[in-house]
Image (cartoon, helix red, strand yellow):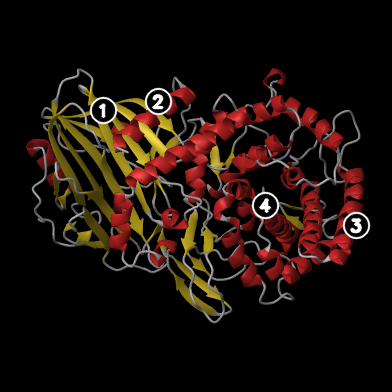
Amino acid sequence: MKLLVFALLLVPFIARVHGVQTFWPAAIPYAVRTPYLNTWIGTAGSDSSKDWPVFWDGAVTGWILYIQVDGKTYTLFGNNNLPSNYSVTAGIVVETELTPTQTIQVIEAGPMNVTLTFLSPVNPSDLVRQSLPFSYLAVNFTSTDGQPHDIQLYSDISGEWLSGNRGQEMTWSPPTNTGDIVYHQLRLQTSSAFQENTHQAEDGVAYFAMGLEPTRNITLQTCEDTVCREEFILAAGVNSNDNNSTNRAINSLWPVFPISVNLGSVSSVDQPIVWIIGYVRDPNINYTLSGNSASLRPYYTANFSTTESALEFFVSDFNNSLAAATALDADLHNAASTVSPDGKLYDMLSLATRQVFSSLEITAPYSSGQADDATRIFMKDLARTQRVTPVETLYAALPMLLYFNNASLVKPLLLPLLEQQNVSLSQYLCAAKDLGESFPEVNGPVLLSQEGIEQTGNMLIAALAHARYSQDTSLLHDYYALFKSWAQYLTTDNNALYPHDQTSIDDGSTSPNSTNLAVKGIFAIQAMAEISQLVGQTNDYQQFSSTASSFMQTWQSLALSSGNETVLITYGGQPASWVLPYNLYVQTLLGFNLLNQTLFDQLTVTYGQWIDSSFEGYKYGLPIESASTSPGNVAWNAFIAATVTNNTVRDQLLDSLWNYASSNATSTPFLVWYDVETGSCINGSMSALGGLFAPFLRR
């Protein structure tokens, strides 16, 4: 099928979803594919047709796109910093639409309507494609007067993709022509393996590529930014000379790497013009297990012997990628519409899906005396820290990971955590909080006893959820002894029921007897009971199930207010001081029967009144607790939306989260922590946004 057909199918689909544009997030994704291929454009008080794309933290990632129409040049994105005597006009952004895999912008450039499609594929059932560290920019256009016009296109990238330190020396190869594709490649003169500088990696190679078409005049060049851009404006192309061969610092006369296309006199194109941008790190994870280190390679390297062959495949795969992306978008739209017919949940998923997937590094199996060949996935605490697979964030993202269960994403995420802690049951009586604090260096489990109940609960719940939703019990069998020892930690001395001196993952405070944490611990004991049942350990099942039931009866007598309003309080506390009971979602997710449905009905009424606009409730979602300074958390609010028993309350909660996602109070990407009073982003991981899938997963 022609590319044009896919493109034409896509835009009407989006229009049917939204009609007039109403969703205005503070930043929109351009190329959001891995932790280090993560580029956005801000929308707060700006015009994307004349602004630089930026890394998620706001640092410029030099990338510009021009279109020349009958000799007049327009920017479609990127800051034109040429002298005023070079007449360049910013295109007019007509519409910006988001899907879970694409950002589509319609920009008016004189008599041409130009459609930009930024496609960051999401391939949950194909880990080869998902692990390819490349992203597409596709350009379609049509004349508004029906007449042909003389059209040229130009795009370049700079060395700003290579390091957060723009004074670093960089080097590059002459433009390469394989017969099927043309590409630039650039890297640091001296790379630092597995290191970051202000969040950007220091050990990758940037690629900028395009497929060769016999009917298109494609030229490449390397030169100083002003030289290349001036040449295009004056000559409608670049001269294919490598006159920029002197290696130098990223910010020294700003070397750029353009690819230009001269289309001649046309009114439209039958196939889009597609650029490919990539940032390749091979190896991508340094993995230490039992004192032995291995440099793990990206998953796609099991299928492609060279980066060039992988790049050629990605270029040639655009048809398939767009078709698969359109199908995934449609599936998610249909699913979201059953929960949120107004499209607001779909809007949020259109931001969150790419963000969560971009936090993952998928590695190929490797041979080692310490480990069996297996796929491993590592999650970066993206946009917050360098922690490796933070367990509470994995728990928050669990609904999304389970929703895409055909890829069994949870198993390769859990595997490194389990095999690392299985080396010594006596050392890891409770579960670790992550696999280190220096992503992409995986140095080993970080155990914090003050988070023992939190992280142990997260691991047991995640393990059972994976087995239930994937119908795969292999992890349960392989690590049963470890799971059992963790469950015994929760039951010993009533640890789960009375969680003493535990640090809150929400605000970092330490307090006795957190009722929200206690209920997670109790659910985790029940999870262990069902794990035991699945592996045929009947005695263990009966023991853990009995304990969970007994603990829950006591919990209900201590954790719930006895007044007119049912709220979750600290044991013995007052109803005026409440906490958000987001961990009750575990019963909804796993279909437990430890709590009576009537309790969920009562909690729905109380918490629902605070989000109801007619009660002057919270506009941007519920805070973590009733304290005036308490922030909101997108994932936990989504968990509550999935747990409440009244659809009106669910819809109000989702609407309030949409208000935050659509707020322009700050210029950052959509992050999990925010101010419930102003809708301003505070911080927090992108990875945790997978919690927005919670309304889909109910048993």
Amino acid type assigned to the residue bearing label 4 in the image: Ile
Foreground: disc 2 or disc 3: 2
Circles 1 and 4: CB distance less than 8 Å? Answer: no
Amino acid type assigned to the residue bearing label 2 in the image: Pro
> Mark 4: which secondary structure?
loop
Amino acid type assigned to the residue bearing label 1 in the image: Gly
Q: In this view of the protein, can residue 45 be seen by the observer? A: no
Residue neighbourhood size for the residue with mark 1, other residues' Cα within 10 Å, grouped as few (<14), some (14–19), many (≥20): many
Residue that carries the numbered disc 3 in the rendered image: 546
Foreground: disc 2 or disc 1: 2
Picture layout, residue 538 above or below residue 242: below
Give the alpha-carbon distance from disc 2 to disc 1, as whole Å.
22 Å
Residue that carries the numbered disc 4 in the rendered image: 505
Residue neighbourhood size for the residue with mark 2, other residues' Cα within 10 Å, grouped as few (<14), some (14–19), many (≥20): few
Q: Residue at x 53, y 74 (%)?
A: 288
Decide which of 473, 350 is in the foreground and name it.
473
Q: Earlier in the sequence, mark 4 or mark 3?
A: 4
Amino acid type assigned to the residue bearing label 3 in the image: Ser
Give the alpha-carbon distance from disc 3 to disc 1, as whole Å.
67 Å
